[in-house]
Protein backbone atom coordinates (compact mmCIF):
# COMPACT_ATOMS: atom_id res chain seq x y z
CA UNK A 1 0.00 0.00 0.00
CA UNK A 2 1.48 3.36 -1.08
CA UNK A 3 1.88 6.15 1.44
CA UNK A 4 0.13 9.51 1.26
CA UNK A 5 2.32 12.31 -0.13
CA UNK A 6 2.43 15.35 2.16
CA UNK A 7 4.27 18.56 3.06
CA UNK A 8 5.90 18.61 6.50
CA UNK A 9 5.67 21.96 8.34
CA UNK A 10 7.44 22.13 11.71
CA UNK A 11 5.79 24.42 14.24
CA UNK A 12 2.43 24.62 12.44
CA UNK A 13 0.31 24.65 15.59
CA UNK A 14 0.37 28.45 15.83
CA UNK A 15 1.85 31.67 14.44
CA UNK A 16 3.43 31.81 11.01
CA UNK A 17 3.67 28.03 10.80
CA UNK A 18 -0.11 27.80 11.19
CA UNK A 19 -0.61 30.40 8.46
CA UNK A 20 1.58 28.46 6.04
CA UNK A 21 -0.20 25.20 6.86
CA UNK A 22 -3.53 26.92 6.23
CA UNK A 23 -2.40 28.09 2.81
CA UNK A 24 -1.18 24.62 1.85
CA UNK A 25 -4.39 23.02 3.04
CA UNK A 26 -6.39 25.53 0.98
CA UNK A 27 -4.46 24.29 -2.06
CA UNK A 28 -5.67 20.76 -1.32
CA UNK A 29 -2.39 19.40 0.04
CA UNK A 30 -1.94 17.07 2.97
CA UNK A 31 0.09 18.76 5.72
CA UNK A 32 2.06 17.03 8.48
CA UNK A 33 2.62 19.24 11.53
CA UNK A 34 5.39 18.46 14.04
CA UNK A 35 5.36 20.78 17.06
CA UNK A 36 5.89 20.71 20.82
CA UNK A 37 2.12 21.05 21.31
CA UNK A 38 -0.91 19.80 19.38
CA UNK A 39 -2.86 22.53 17.53
CA UNK A 40 -6.15 23.93 18.81
CA UNK A 41 -7.53 23.86 15.27
CA UNK A 42 -8.25 20.98 12.90
CA UNK A 43 -8.59 20.11 9.23
CA UNK A 44 -9.34 16.79 7.52
CA UNK A 45 -5.96 16.85 5.77
CA UNK A 46 -3.90 18.10 8.73
CA UNK A 47 -1.92 15.37 10.53
CA UNK A 48 -0.20 16.46 13.75
CA UNK A 49 2.62 14.84 15.72
CA UNK A 50 3.75 16.10 19.11
CA UNK A 51 7.52 16.33 19.71
CA UNK A 52 9.99 18.67 21.38
CA UNK A 53 12.19 19.64 18.43
CA UNK A 54 14.86 21.11 20.73
CA UNK A 55 15.73 17.51 21.65
CA UNK A 56 17.68 15.61 18.99
CA UNK A 57 16.37 12.20 20.01
CA UNK A 58 12.74 13.40 20.04
CA UNK A 59 13.22 14.99 16.61
CA UNK A 60 14.59 11.75 15.14
CA UNK A 61 11.75 9.68 16.62
CA UNK A 62 9.11 12.11 15.33
CA UNK A 63 10.64 12.07 11.85
CA UNK A 64 10.72 8.27 11.82
CA UNK A 65 7.07 8.12 12.89
CA UNK A 66 6.06 10.60 10.17
CA UNK A 67 7.92 8.68 7.44
CA UNK A 68 6.25 5.42 8.42
CA UNK A 69 2.93 6.97 7.37
CA UNK A 70 3.77 9.62 4.74
CA UNK A 71 6.07 10.35 1.81
CA UNK A 72 7.34 13.89 2.40
CA UNK A 73 7.75 15.77 -0.90
CA UNK A 74 8.22 19.27 0.57
CA UNK A 75 9.57 20.43 3.90
CA UNK A 76 9.08 23.80 5.63
CA UNK A 77 11.50 24.15 8.56
CA UNK A 78 10.03 26.87 10.75
CA UNK A 79 13.39 27.57 12.46
CA UNK A 80 13.69 30.34 15.03
CA UNK A 81 10.47 29.58 16.89
CA UNK A 82 10.63 29.11 20.66
CA UNK A 83 8.09 28.13 23.27
CA UNK A 84 5.92 31.16 24.16
CA UNK A 85 6.41 32.70 27.58
CA UNK A 86 10.10 31.80 27.96
CA UNK A 87 11.98 33.81 25.39
CA UNK A 88 11.57 37.28 26.94
CA UNK A 89 13.53 36.31 30.05
CA UNK A 90 16.44 34.66 28.28
CA UNK A 91 19.94 36.08 28.04
CA UNK A 92 21.90 36.51 24.82
CA UNK A 93 23.74 33.27 25.57
CA UNK A 94 20.44 31.46 26.02
CA UNK A 95 19.18 32.85 22.72
CA UNK A 96 22.31 31.66 20.92
CA UNK A 97 21.79 28.20 22.39
CA UNK A 98 18.13 28.19 21.31
CA UNK A 99 19.12 29.16 17.77
CA UNK A 100 21.66 26.32 17.68
CA UNK A 101 18.94 23.86 18.73
CA UNK A 102 16.49 25.06 16.07
CA UNK A 103 19.18 24.77 13.41
CA UNK A 104 19.83 21.25 14.71
CA UNK A 105 16.14 20.42 14.26
CA UNK A 106 16.23 21.84 10.73
CA UNK A 107 19.19 19.64 9.85
CA UNK A 108 17.76 16.47 11.43
CA UNK A 109 14.34 16.81 9.78
CA UNK A 110 15.91 17.49 6.39
CA UNK A 111 18.24 14.50 6.66
CA UNK A 112 15.38 12.21 7.65
CA UNK A 113 13.21 13.33 4.71
CA UNK A 114 15.97 13.20 2.05
CA UNK A 115 14.98 9.75 0.64
CA UNK A 116 11.41 10.82 -0.19
CA UNK A 117 12.47 14.33 -1.27
CA UNK A 118 14.88 12.75 -3.78
CA UNK A 119 12.41 10.08 -4.89
CA UNK A 120 9.69 12.54 -5.90
CA UNK A 121 12.07 14.26 -8.35
CA UNK A 122 11.01 17.80 -7.36
CA UNK A 123 11.60 17.92 -3.62
CA UNK A 124 11.50 21.31 -1.93
CA UNK A 125 13.01 22.54 1.31
CA UNK A 126 12.20 25.97 2.76
CA UNK A 127 14.03 27.16 5.89
CA UNK A 128 12.46 29.99 7.86
CA UNK A 129 13.34 32.45 10.61
CA UNK A 130 10.69 34.65 12.18
CA UNK A 131 11.47 37.69 14.31
CA UNK A 132 8.05 37.56 15.92
CA UNK A 133 9.09 34.29 17.55
CA UNK A 134 11.71 36.21 19.51
CA UNK A 135 9.15 38.31 21.36
CA UNK A 136 10.55 41.54 22.83
CA UNK A 137 14.22 40.70 22.45
CA UNK A 138 16.70 42.87 20.55
CA UNK A 139 16.69 42.84 16.75
CA UNK A 140 20.34 41.78 16.77
CA UNK A 141 19.24 38.40 18.15
CA UNK A 142 16.95 37.96 15.17
CA UNK A 143 19.79 38.98 12.85
CA UNK A 144 22.02 36.31 14.38
CA UNK A 145 19.31 33.66 13.97
CA UNK A 146 18.73 34.70 10.37
CA UNK A 147 22.44 34.64 9.54
CA UNK A 148 22.78 31.12 10.95
CA UNK A 149 19.79 30.00 8.90
CA UNK A 150 21.25 31.52 5.73
CA UNK A 151 24.55 29.71 6.30
CA UNK A 152 22.84 26.35 6.77
CA UNK A 153 20.61 26.92 3.72
CA UNK A 154 23.62 27.77 1.56
CA UNK A 155 25.28 24.50 2.58
CA UNK A 156 22.09 22.52 1.92
CA UNK A 157 21.69 24.06 -1.53
CA UNK A 158 25.26 23.18 -2.49
CA UNK A 159 24.82 19.57 -1.35
CA UNK A 160 21.28 18.89 -2.59
CA UNK A 161 21.10 20.90 -5.81
CA UNK A 162 22.38 17.95 -7.83
CA UNK A 163 19.58 15.73 -6.50
CA UNK A 164 16.80 17.87 -7.99
CA UNK A 165 15.89 19.33 -4.59
CA UNK A 166 15.16 23.06 -4.44
CA UNK A 167 16.39 24.78 -1.26
CA UNK A 168 15.39 28.30 -0.21
CA UNK A 169 15.37 30.46 2.91
CA UNK A 170 12.85 33.11 3.88
CA UNK A 171 12.89 35.59 6.74
CA UNK A 172 9.57 37.49 6.68
CA UNK A 173 10.56 40.00 9.36
CA UNK A 174 8.49 41.52 12.18
CA UNK A 175 5.74 43.23 10.14
CA UNK A 176 4.80 40.29 7.97
CA UNK A 177 5.01 37.89 10.88
CA UNK A 178 2.75 40.02 13.05
CA UNK A 179 0.20 40.09 10.22
CA UNK A 180 0.33 36.30 10.17
CA UNK A 181 -0.38 36.24 13.87
CA UNK A 182 -3.31 38.65 13.71
CA UNK A 183 -4.98 37.20 10.63
CA UNK A 184 -7.10 34.15 10.04
CA UNK A 185 -4.60 31.65 8.58
CA UNK A 186 -7.26 29.95 6.47
CA UNK A 187 -8.46 32.76 4.27
CA UNK A 188 -7.99 36.35 5.42
CA UNK A 189 -7.09 38.37 2.29
CA UNK A 190 -4.25 40.20 3.99
CA UNK A 191 -2.60 36.98 5.12
CA UNK A 192 -3.21 35.32 1.77
CA UNK A 193 -1.43 38.14 -0.08
CA UNK A 194 1.63 37.71 2.13
CA UNK A 195 1.56 33.96 1.69
CA UNK A 196 1.28 34.33 -2.08
CA UNK A 197 4.24 36.69 -2.24
CA UNK A 198 6.50 34.75 0.14
CA UNK A 199 5.68 31.08 0.26
CA UNK A 200 4.13 30.18 -3.09
CA UNK A 201 6.84 31.87 -5.17
CA UNK A 202 9.59 30.48 -3.01
CA UNK A 203 8.24 26.93 -2.97
CA UNK A 204 6.76 26.85 -6.44
CA UNK A 205 9.83 27.38 -8.64
CA UNK A 206 13.24 25.70 -8.52
CA UNK A 207 15.39 28.81 -8.10
CA UNK A 208 18.40 28.85 -5.86
CA UNK A 209 19.69 25.29 -6.12
CA UNK A 210 20.47 25.64 -9.81
CA UNK A 211 21.73 29.24 -9.87
CA UNK A 212 25.45 29.90 -10.18
CA UNK A 213 27.27 33.04 -9.12
CA UNK A 214 30.84 34.18 -9.50
CA UNK A 215 32.88 33.97 -6.28
CA UNK A 216 34.73 37.21 -7.12
CA UNK A 217 32.35 39.62 -8.86
CA UNK A 218 29.12 38.09 -7.44
CA UNK A 219 27.37 38.33 -10.82
CA UNK A 220 25.60 35.41 -12.42
CA UNK A 221 27.74 33.50 -14.89
CA UNK A 222 25.10 34.00 -17.56
CA UNK A 223 25.26 37.82 -17.31
CA UNK A 224 29.03 38.18 -17.22
CA UNK A 225 30.75 35.09 -18.68
CA UNK A 226 33.90 36.98 -19.60
CA UNK A 227 34.60 37.95 -16.00
CA UNK A 228 33.62 34.73 -14.30
CA UNK A 229 36.04 31.81 -14.42
CA UNK A 230 35.00 30.22 -11.13
CA UNK A 231 31.43 29.73 -9.90
CA UNK A 232 29.88 28.63 -6.65
CA UNK A 233 26.30 27.86 -5.71
CA UNK A 234 24.29 31.05 -5.31
CA UNK A 235 23.35 32.15 -1.80
CA UNK A 236 19.70 31.92 -0.72
CA UNK A 237 18.93 35.55 -1.51
CA UNK A 238 20.27 35.36 -5.09
CA UNK A 239 16.94 34.56 -6.76
CA UNK A 240 14.33 36.31 -4.64
CA UNK A 241 11.06 37.20 -6.41
CA UNK A 242 10.90 40.88 -7.51
CA UNK A 243 8.96 41.99 -4.46
CA UNK A 244 11.74 40.63 -2.24
CA UNK A 245 14.81 41.91 -4.08
CA UNK A 246 16.36 43.70 -1.14
CA UNK A 247 19.87 42.32 -1.50
CA UNK A 248 21.90 39.99 0.72
CA UNK A 249 21.47 39.99 4.52
CA UNK A 250 24.17 42.59 5.20
CA UNK A 251 22.29 45.01 2.91
CA UNK A 252 19.00 44.33 4.68
CA UNK A 253 20.48 44.69 8.15
CA UNK A 254 23.82 46.57 8.45
CA UNK A 255 24.60 44.74 11.67
CA UNK A 256 25.07 41.50 9.76
CA UNK A 257 28.61 40.83 8.50
CA UNK A 258 29.47 41.78 4.90
CA UNK A 259 30.42 39.14 2.32
CA UNK A 260 33.64 37.28 3.08
CA UNK A 261 35.10 37.56 -0.44
CA UNK A 262 36.35 41.16 -0.32
CA UNK A 263 39.90 41.79 -1.37
CA UNK A 264 42.34 42.15 1.51
CA UNK A 265 45.73 43.83 1.82
CA UNK A 266 48.78 41.65 1.36
CA UNK A 267 50.28 40.21 4.57
CA UNK A 268 52.53 42.67 6.35
CA UNK A 269 50.79 45.74 4.94
CA UNK A 270 48.04 47.80 6.51
CA UNK A 271 45.70 50.42 5.21
CA UNK A 272 46.60 54.06 5.43
CA UNK A 273 45.02 56.60 7.71
CA UNK A 274 44.66 54.52 10.86
CA UNK A 275 47.38 53.83 13.46
CA UNK A 276 47.74 50.26 14.67
CA UNK A 277 46.83 51.20 18.25
CA UNK A 278 43.42 52.36 17.08
CA UNK A 279 42.53 48.84 15.90
CA UNK A 280 42.57 47.35 19.39
CA UNK A 281 40.61 50.27 20.84
CA UNK A 282 37.81 50.13 18.27
CA UNK A 283 37.70 46.35 17.81
CA UNK A 284 35.23 44.80 17.39
CA UNK A 285 33.17 47.38 15.52
CA UNK A 286 30.58 44.89 14.20
CA UNK A 287 29.53 41.25 14.62
CA UNK A 288 32.28 38.64 14.35
CA UNK A 289 31.85 35.63 12.08
CA UNK A 290 33.46 32.24 12.71
CA UNK A 291 33.76 30.27 9.48
CA UNK A 292 33.31 26.54 10.11
CA UNK A 293 34.54 24.36 7.23
CA UNK A 294 32.17 21.47 7.95
CA UNK A 295 28.42 20.92 8.14
CA UNK A 296 26.35 21.93 11.15
CA UNK A 297 26.09 19.32 13.91
CA UNK A 298 29.66 18.02 13.65
CA UNK A 299 32.42 18.46 16.22
CA UNK A 300 33.93 21.57 14.57
CA UNK A 301 30.49 23.21 14.54
CA UNK A 302 29.73 22.21 18.14
CA UNK A 303 33.01 23.66 19.43
CA UNK A 304 32.60 26.86 17.40
CA UNK A 305 29.12 27.46 18.81
CA UNK A 306 30.14 26.82 22.43
CA UNK A 307 33.14 29.16 22.13
CA UNK A 308 31.19 31.68 20.05
CA UNK A 309 28.52 31.99 22.74
CA UNK A 310 31.15 32.82 25.34
CA UNK A 311 33.02 35.23 23.02
CA UNK A 312 29.73 37.01 22.46
CA UNK A 313 29.87 38.29 26.02
CA UNK A 314 33.64 38.80 26.15
CA UNK A 315 33.86 40.90 22.97
CA UNK A 316 30.59 42.76 23.41
CA UNK A 317 29.43 41.86 19.89
CA UNK A 318 27.40 39.08 18.34
CA UNK A 319 29.48 36.10 17.22
CA UNK A 320 27.95 34.25 14.27
CA UNK A 321 28.79 30.81 12.88
CA UNK A 322 28.95 30.38 9.09
CA UNK A 323 29.14 26.74 7.91
CA UNK A 324 30.99 26.34 4.59
CA UNK A 325 31.36 22.60 4.07
CA UNK A 326 33.14 20.67 1.33
CA UNK A 327 36.50 19.41 0.02
CA UNK A 328 37.74 18.21 3.40
CA UNK A 329 37.44 21.71 4.87
CA UNK A 330 39.26 23.45 2.00
CA UNK A 331 36.23 25.45 0.81
CA UNK A 332 35.73 27.15 4.18
CA UNK A 333 39.47 27.63 4.65
CA UNK A 334 39.84 29.32 1.27
CA UNK A 335 36.93 31.63 2.02
CA UNK A 336 38.33 32.65 5.42
CA UNK A 337 41.84 33.13 4.00
CA UNK A 338 40.49 35.72 1.54
CA UNK A 339 38.44 37.63 4.12
CA UNK A 340 39.26 41.18 5.17
CA UNK A 341 41.99 40.85 7.86
CA UNK A 342 40.37 43.08 10.46
CA UNK A 343 39.47 40.46 13.09
CA UNK A 344 35.79 40.31 12.21
CA UNK A 345 36.20 37.01 10.34
CA UNK A 346 37.71 34.07 12.21
CA UNK A 347 38.25 30.47 11.16
CA UNK A 348 37.80 27.31 13.22
CA UNK A 349 40.67 25.25 11.84
CA UNK A 350 41.37 21.59 12.43
CA UNK A 351 44.25 19.16 12.22
CA UNK A 352 42.91 18.41 8.73
CA UNK A 353 42.87 21.94 7.32
CA UNK A 354 46.21 22.99 8.84
CA UNK A 355 48.34 19.84 9.18
CA UNK A 356 47.03 17.08 6.90
CA UNK A 357 45.52 18.52 3.72
CA UNK A 358 48.75 20.01 2.38
CA UNK A 359 50.18 16.46 2.26
CA UNK A 360 46.98 14.81 1.04
CA UNK A 361 46.07 17.22 -1.78
CA UNK A 362 48.46 17.98 -4.65
CA UNK A 363 47.29 21.59 -4.75
CA UNK A 364 45.45 23.67 -2.15
CA UNK A 365 43.57 26.91 -2.89
CA UNK A 366 45.21 28.49 0.19
CA UNK A 367 48.46 28.30 2.16
CA UNK A 368 47.83 27.00 5.72
CA UNK A 369 50.87 28.92 7.02
CA UNK A 370 51.10 32.12 4.95
CA UNK A 371 47.35 32.85 4.69
CA UNK A 372 46.47 32.59 8.39
CA UNK A 373 47.44 34.14 11.71
CA UNK A 374 47.17 31.46 14.43
CA UNK A 375 45.39 32.61 17.61
CA UNK A 376 45.28 29.56 19.89
CA UNK A 377 44.43 25.90 20.04
CA UNK A 378 40.99 25.57 21.61
CA UNK A 379 40.52 21.84 22.19
CA UNK A 380 42.13 18.41 21.98
CA UNK A 381 39.63 15.71 21.07
CA UNK A 382 40.01 11.92 20.97
CA UNK A 383 38.47 10.05 18.09
CA UNK A 384 36.12 7.22 18.87
CA UNK A 385 35.95 4.01 16.83
CA UNK A 386 32.21 3.34 16.64
CA UNK A 387 30.17 0.74 14.77
CA UNK A 388 26.52 0.14 14.05
CA UNK A 389 25.18 -2.16 16.82
CA UNK A 390 23.85 -4.57 14.20
CA UNK A 391 27.30 -5.41 12.86
CA UNK A 392 28.86 -8.78 13.80
CA UNK A 393 31.94 -7.32 15.55
CA UNK A 394 31.75 -6.12 19.16
CA UNK A 395 35.39 -5.18 19.77
CA UNK A 396 38.57 -4.26 17.88
CA UNK A 397 39.88 -7.83 17.60
CA UNK A 398 36.62 -9.04 16.07
CA UNK A 399 36.60 -6.07 13.66
CA UNK A 400 40.17 -6.85 12.52
CA UNK A 401 39.36 -10.54 12.07
CA UNK A 402 36.19 -9.76 10.10
CA UNK A 403 37.97 -7.19 7.90
CA UNK A 404 40.78 -9.66 7.11
CA UNK A 405 38.26 -12.37 6.24
CA UNK A 406 36.29 -9.93 4.05
CA UNK A 407 38.88 -7.62 2.39
CA UNK A 408 37.33 -4.54 0.80
CA UNK A 409 33.86 -5.28 2.17
CA UNK A 410 34.08 -3.20 5.36
CA UNK A 411 33.89 0.57 4.93
CA UNK A 412 34.48 3.53 7.23
CA UNK A 413 32.95 6.99 6.93
CA UNK A 414 34.63 10.33 7.56
CA UNK A 415 33.90 14.05 7.58
CA UNK A 416 35.90 14.40 4.37
CA UNK A 417 39.19 13.49 2.74
CA UNK A 418 42.09 14.78 4.81
CA UNK A 419 40.20 15.05 8.07
CA UNK A 420 41.60 13.45 11.21
CA UNK A 421 38.69 11.00 11.00
CA UNK A 422 39.88 9.90 7.55
CA UNK A 423 43.55 9.61 8.55
CA UNK A 424 42.64 7.73 11.74
CA UNK A 425 41.04 5.09 9.51
CA UNK A 426 44.02 4.97 7.14
CA UNK A 427 46.39 4.59 10.11
CA UNK A 428 44.22 1.70 11.37
CA UNK A 429 44.39 0.07 7.93
CA UNK A 430 48.19 0.31 7.93
CA UNK A 431 48.83 -0.94 11.48
CA UNK A 432 46.13 -3.64 11.55
CA UNK A 433 46.98 -4.73 7.98
CA UNK A 434 43.37 -4.62 6.81
CA UNK A 435 41.64 -3.07 3.77
CA UNK A 436 38.66 -1.00 4.87
CA UNK A 437 37.19 1.31 2.18
CA UNK A 438 37.03 5.05 2.89
CA UNK A 439 33.65 6.80 2.33
CA UNK A 440 34.04 10.63 2.61
CA UNK A 441 31.16 12.97 3.54
CA UNK A 442 30.81 16.76 3.70
CA UNK A 443 31.02 16.82 7.47
CA UNK A 444 30.77 14.50 10.44
CA UNK A 445 27.03 14.93 11.05
CA UNK A 446 25.81 13.38 7.75
CA UNK A 447 28.33 10.55 8.12
CA UNK A 448 27.10 9.76 11.64
CA UNK A 449 23.50 9.84 10.39
CA UNK A 450 24.30 7.17 7.79
CA UNK A 451 26.24 5.16 10.36
CA UNK A 452 23.24 5.18 12.72
CA UNK A 453 21.06 4.16 9.78
CA UNK A 454 23.38 1.27 8.84
CA UNK A 455 24.47 2.68 5.45
CA UNK A 456 28.15 2.54 6.50
CA UNK A 457 29.92 0.10 8.83
CA UNK A 458 32.30 1.95 11.17
CA UNK A 459 33.71 5.43 11.79
CA UNK A 460 36.63 6.96 13.70
CA UNK A 461 34.53 9.97 14.67
CA UNK A 462 35.48 12.90 16.89
CA UNK A 463 34.05 12.13 20.32
CA UNK A 464 31.77 15.22 20.67
CA UNK A 465 29.63 14.25 17.67
CA UNK A 466 29.50 10.51 18.53
CA UNK A 467 29.31 10.29 22.30
CA UNK A 468 25.56 11.00 22.58
CA UNK A 469 24.79 8.18 20.13
CA UNK A 470 26.97 5.81 22.17
CA UNK A 471 25.18 6.77 25.38
CA UNK A 472 21.77 6.26 23.74
CA UNK A 473 22.76 2.84 22.34
CA UNK A 474 22.43 3.84 18.70
CA UNK A 475 26.15 3.22 18.17
CA UNK A 476 28.60 0.75 19.73
CA UNK A 477 31.92 2.16 20.97
CA UNK A 478 34.79 -0.22 20.17
CA UNK A 479 37.79 1.89 21.27
CA UNK A 480 39.27 5.40 21.58
CA UNK A 481 42.18 6.47 19.38
CA UNK A 482 44.27 8.16 22.09
CA UNK A 483 47.07 6.64 24.18
CA UNK A 484 44.92 6.84 27.34
CA UNK A 485 41.27 6.06 27.99
CA UNK A 486 38.79 8.95 27.99
CA UNK A 487 37.35 10.08 31.37
CA UNK A 488 33.96 10.41 29.67
CA UNK A 489 33.99 6.73 28.57
CA UNK A 490 36.27 5.01 31.08
CA UNK A 491 35.07 1.51 30.13
CA UNK A 492 36.04 1.90 26.47
CA UNK A 493 39.62 0.68 25.80
CA UNK A 494 42.20 2.34 23.59
CA UNK A 495 42.80 0.85 20.14
CA UNK A 496 46.37 0.07 21.18
CA UNK A 497 45.35 -2.00 24.19
CA UNK A 498 42.42 -3.56 22.30
CA UNK A 499 44.55 -5.27 19.68
CA UNK A 500 46.48 -2.81 17.47
CA UNK A 501 49.72 -1.99 19.34
CA UNK A 502 51.29 1.42 18.70
CA UNK A 503 48.09 3.04 17.45
CA UNK A 504 47.51 6.67 18.56
CA UNK A 505 45.68 9.56 16.90
CA UNK A 506 44.33 12.76 18.43
CA UNK A 507 42.30 15.52 16.79
CA UNK A 508 42.81 19.16 17.61
CA UNK A 509 40.92 22.33 16.81
CA UNK A 510 42.19 25.90 16.78
CA UNK A 511 41.10 29.46 16.04
CA UNK A 512 42.70 31.47 13.24
CA UNK A 513 42.41 34.94 11.72
CA UNK A 514 43.33 35.87 8.14
CA UNK A 515 47.00 36.77 7.65
CA UNK A 516 47.57 40.49 7.89
CA UNK A 517 45.25 40.97 10.86
CA UNK A 518 46.74 43.81 12.98
CA UNK A 519 48.90 42.60 15.87
CA UNK A 520 46.81 44.43 18.53
CA UNK A 521 43.67 42.67 17.28
CA UNK A 522 45.43 39.28 17.31
CA UNK A 523 46.51 39.96 20.89
CA UNK A 524 42.96 41.00 21.87
CA UNK A 525 41.47 37.87 20.33
CA UNK A 526 44.06 35.60 21.95
CA UNK A 527 43.40 37.12 25.37
CA UNK A 528 39.63 36.79 24.90
CA UNK A 529 39.91 33.15 23.81
CA UNK A 530 42.26 32.25 26.68
CA UNK A 531 39.81 33.81 29.15
CA UNK A 532 36.83 32.05 27.57
CA UNK A 533 38.55 28.64 27.59
CA UNK A 534 39.36 29.08 31.28
CA UNK A 535 35.70 29.75 32.11
CA UNK A 536 34.36 26.83 34.23
CA UNK A 537 31.05 26.84 32.35
CA UNK A 538 32.79 26.53 28.98
CA UNK A 539 35.17 23.86 30.29
CA UNK A 540 32.19 21.89 31.57
CA UNK A 541 30.36 22.08 28.23
CA UNK A 542 33.44 20.93 26.34
CA UNK A 543 34.19 18.14 28.84
CA UNK A 544 30.62 16.83 28.49
CA UNK A 545 31.35 16.43 24.78
CA UNK A 546 34.60 14.57 25.43
CA UNK A 547 36.79 17.56 24.45
CA UNK A 548 39.72 18.87 26.50
CA UNK A 549 39.96 22.71 26.50
CA UNK A 550 43.38 24.05 25.54
CA UNK A 551 44.86 27.53 25.16
CA UNK A 552 48.28 28.96 24.38
CA UNK A 553 50.04 31.93 22.76
CA UNK A 554 49.95 32.44 18.98
CA UNK A 555 53.68 31.61 18.83
CA UNK A 556 53.21 28.33 20.71
CA UNK A 557 50.30 27.40 18.47
CA UNK A 558 52.36 28.11 15.32
CA UNK A 559 55.17 25.85 16.58
CA UNK A 560 52.66 23.11 17.42
CA UNK A 561 51.25 23.28 13.87
CA UNK A 562 54.74 22.87 12.39
CA UNK A 563 55.30 19.69 14.41
CA UNK A 564 51.85 18.31 13.55
CA UNK A 565 52.40 18.96 9.84
CA UNK A 566 55.62 16.92 9.87
CA UNK A 567 53.95 14.10 11.85
CA UNK A 568 50.91 13.75 9.59
CA UNK A 569 52.96 14.15 6.42
CA UNK A 570 54.75 10.95 7.40
CA UNK A 571 51.44 9.16 8.12
CA UNK A 572 50.00 10.20 4.75
CA UNK A 573 53.13 9.06 2.91
CA UNK A 574 53.30 5.67 4.67
CA UNK A 575 49.57 4.99 4.25
CA UNK A 576 49.53 5.98 0.58
CA UNK A 577 46.36 8.03 1.16
CA UNK A 578 45.41 10.66 -1.42
CA UNK A 579 42.43 12.94 -2.04
CA UNK A 580 43.20 13.59 -5.73
Image (tube, rainbow, N blue to C red):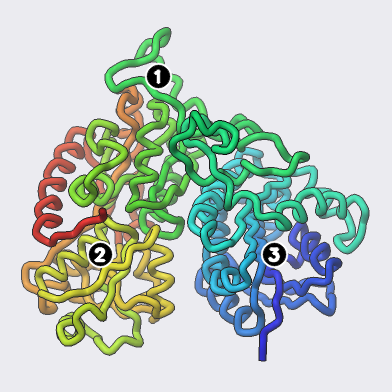
Give the residue displayed 36% in from the left and 39% down from the top: 334
Q: Position of residue 115 (x, y in %)?
A: 54, 73
Closer to the N terminus: mark 3 or mark 2? 3
Q: From the image, tell me which residue sits under label 3.
A: 11
Q: Nearer the viewer, mark 3 or mark 1?
A: 3
Q: From the image, tell me which residue sits under label 1.
A: 279
Task: State the quadrant of the N terminus.
Answer: bottom right
Are dots 3 and 2 in contact, CB under 8 Å? no
Residue furthest left as drawn: 501
Say which element carries label 3: loop
Say which element carries label 2: strand
Q: From the image, tell me which residue sits under label 2.
A: 383
Give the residue displayed 44% in from the left and 35% down from the top: 229
Judge whether 4 appears above or below 168 on screen. Answer: below
Splitting the image into 4 quarters, where does residue 560 fall? top left
**In the image, 470: left or right of 153?**
left
Judge whether 216 appears above or below 382 on screen. Answer: above
Q: CA distance from mark 1 to mark 2?
A: 39 Å
Amino acid sequence: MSKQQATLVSGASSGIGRAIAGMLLAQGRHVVNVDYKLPDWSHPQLHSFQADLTQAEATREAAAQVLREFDITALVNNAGATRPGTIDTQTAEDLAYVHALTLQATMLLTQACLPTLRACGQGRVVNMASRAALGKTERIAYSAAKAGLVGMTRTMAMELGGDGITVNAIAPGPIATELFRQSNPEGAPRTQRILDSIVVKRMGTPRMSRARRCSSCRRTTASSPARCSTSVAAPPWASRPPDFERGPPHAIDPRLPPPLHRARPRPGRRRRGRPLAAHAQSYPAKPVTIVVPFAAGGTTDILARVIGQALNKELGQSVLVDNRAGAGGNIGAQLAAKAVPDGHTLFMGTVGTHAINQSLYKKLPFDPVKDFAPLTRVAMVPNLLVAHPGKPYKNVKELVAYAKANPGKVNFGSSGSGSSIHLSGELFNALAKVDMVHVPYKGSAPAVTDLVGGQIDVMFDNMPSAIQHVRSGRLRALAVTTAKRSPELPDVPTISEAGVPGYEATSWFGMFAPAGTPAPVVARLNAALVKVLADPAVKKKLAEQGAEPYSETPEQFAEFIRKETAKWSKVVKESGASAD
